[in-house]
Image (cartoon, grey):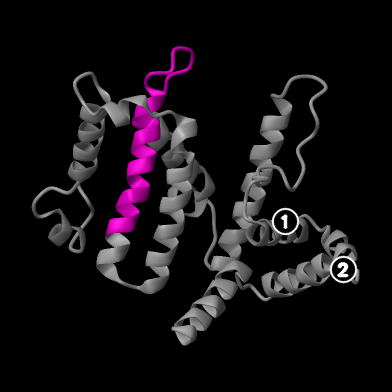
């Protein structure tokens, strides 16, 4: 949902955010009494398939390089975020809205970019990545300190969703274990003769070459399907 002139102005300076407020207002109207019956009956759970679908469509658009397609699909992903935030407002126990969502990620970005918003120093992408890993480790330690007694201590793989596609999840696991100094676990698991071990070994090789195995496979399949057509 964009207001007149938003697209033209976005390339010349910082966005005003007016179109985002318009989207929030539209979503509120759809969800409120007298709005859309379909939107009104949705839940966080019922929208999960749409979030997944829109995410994959956004990835496809980004890899296509088609500007109009990218704008459209990013809008569809943004809609999912605004939709979930609007549903969150109605939670009877712990309500939240788009302001909490936006404030949370803004605070996280400031906290993880001390070289921009504080007195930290990071002059290269590699230095930024190293600082990011340290800050995330500190965040995990802080969460562990505030966890209930008897809770399991945080590990390097905490936060990787079990429902991720296997290839993307394998890449995350390899990268996390390598950063934690436990690459030996990866090498041991990848040393077997099974198909899974050989796949894991290839994933580890690609990750350690600073590439994305999921993106590499998508590109190869895209070339294959183009040739098949």
Find residue 148 and name its label.
Answer: none
Span shown in magenta = 72-99
Q: Quadrant of residue 102?
A: top left
Camera-nearest residue between 107 and 159: 159
Q: Quadrant of residue 162?
A: top right
Residue beneath the point at 74% across and 69% down: 204
Magenta highlight on residue 80: yes
Residue annotated with mark 1: 173
Mark 2, Cα crowd under 10 Å, few <14 / some 14-19 / many 20+, is: few
Task: Decide which of tag 2 and tag 1 comes sooner along the chain.
Answer: 1
Magenta highlight on residue 136: no
x%, y% of residue 108? 49, 41
At mark 2, the secondary structure is loop
x%, y% of residue 50? 42, 45
Camera-nearest residue between 185 and 135: 185
Mark 1, Cα crowd under 10 Å, few <14 / some 14-19 / many 20+, is: some
Left or right position of 12 against 102: left
Instruction: From this view, report whether residue 106 is shown above or below residue 99.
Output: below
């Amino acid at each position: 949902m964009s207001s007149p002139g938003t697209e033209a102005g976005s390339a010349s300076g910082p966005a005003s955010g007016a179109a985002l407020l318009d989207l929030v207002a539209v979503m509120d109207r759809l969800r409120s009494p007298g709005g859309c019956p379909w939107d009104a009956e949705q839940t966080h759970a019922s929208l999960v398939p749409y979030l997944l679908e829109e995410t994959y469509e956004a990835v496809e658009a980004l890899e296509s390089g088609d500007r109009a397609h990218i704008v459209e699909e990013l809008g569809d992903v943004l809609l999912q975020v605004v939709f979930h935030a609007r549903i969150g407002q109605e939670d009877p126990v712990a309500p939240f809205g788009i302001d909490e969502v936006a404030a949370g990620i803004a605070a996280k970005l400031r906290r993880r970019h001390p070289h921009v918003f504080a007195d930290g120093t990071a002059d290269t992408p590699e230095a930024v990545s190293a600082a990011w890993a340290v800050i995330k480790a500190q965040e995990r330690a802080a969460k562990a300190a505030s966890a209930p007694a008897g809770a399991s201590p945080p590990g390097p793989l905490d936060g990787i969703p079990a429902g991720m596609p296997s290839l993307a999840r394998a890449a995350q696991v390899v990268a996390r274990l390598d950063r934690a100094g436990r690459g030996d676990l990866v090498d041991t698991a990848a040393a077997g003769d099974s198909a899974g071990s050989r796949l894991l070994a290839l994933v580890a090789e690609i990750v350690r070459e600073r590439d994305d195995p999921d993106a590499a496979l998508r590109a190869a399949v895209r070339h294959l399907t183009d040739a098949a057509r």
